[in-house]
């Protein structure tokens, strides 16, 4: 255990710096893309690897996320899982590659277009 601690102290900083840079890049990509979708508002999170964004018109985030899985193959966490104040929000972990986010954004856009079409 002590040897592992020494290695972490000596060699951990570059790994941490690389991980933080990667998360920052995917965070910025995800938040920018989310904010281009009508009906979604996303703020830039600090100190986390999750985007917590509002989906306007959603009053049951659990059901909304279940529909995303069924209809779009996109697994996101309902805001209601984090307390009653989270209702109407959705959480997306950005600890993945931009390629995965590009595909996820395509799926979310398609789901939002279908949702808006049903509302009109």
Image: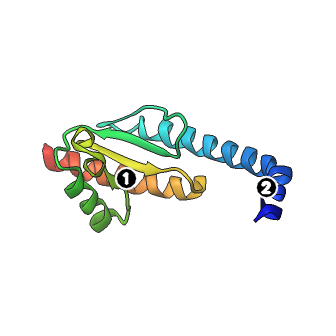
Q: Quadrant of residue 55 in the image?
A: top left
Task: State the image coordinates of residue 28 (x, y, percent, origin top left).
Answer: 56, 38
Residue placed under numbered mark 1 in the picture:
108
Please tell me the numbered disc located at residue 8.
2
| Picture quarter with the C terminus | top left
Secondary structure at numbered mark 1: helix
Which of the numbered marks, if any, corresponds to residue 24?
none
Q: Classify 10 Å Cα crowding around label 2: few (below 14), some (14-19), many (20 and above).
A: few
Circle 2: element type = helix
Judging from the image, the colouring scheme is rainbow
**Drawn side of residue 22 relative to residue 109, left or right:** right
Q: Nearer the viewer, residue 104 or 12?
A: 12
> Residue at position x 42%, y 36% from top?
36
Residues 114 and 29: in front is 29
Q: In x, y percent, where is residue 5?
A: 78, 57
Disc 2 vs disc 1: Cβ atoms closer than 8 Å?
A: no
Expressed as whole percent of the image width and height from the top left, the position of residue 111 reads: 30, 54
Give whichever of discs 2 and 1 has the lower sequence position. 2
**Spatial distance from mark 2 to mark 1, Cα to Cα?**
39 Å
Seen at 31% across and 38% down, the residue is 54
Q: Residue at x 24, y 61 (%)?
A: 67
Percent across and percent down for residue 61 are 23, 50
Of 90 and 55, the residue lying toward us: 90
Taking depth in this image into account, of 87 and 58 the one nearest to the observer is: 87
**Looking at the image, is 76 positioned above or below residue 16?**
below
Check the picture and name the quadrant holding the N terminus: bottom right
- Residue placed furthest toward the front: 2
């Amino acid at each position: 255990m002590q040897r592992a601690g020494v290695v972490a102290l000596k060699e951990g900083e570059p790994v941490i710096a690389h991980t933080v840079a990667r998360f920052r890049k995917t965070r910025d990509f995800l938040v920018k893309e989310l904010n281009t979708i009508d009906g979604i508002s996303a703020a830039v999170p600090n100190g986390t690897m999750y985007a917590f964004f509002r989906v306007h018109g959603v009053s049951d985030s659990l059901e909304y996320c279940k529909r995303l899985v069924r209809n779009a193959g996109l697994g996101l966490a309902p805001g209601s899982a984090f307390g009653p104040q989270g209702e109407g929000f959705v959480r997306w972990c950005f600890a993945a590659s931009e390629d995965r986010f590009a595909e996820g954004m395509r799926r979310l856009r398609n789901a939002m277009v279908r949702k808006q079409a049903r509302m009109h």
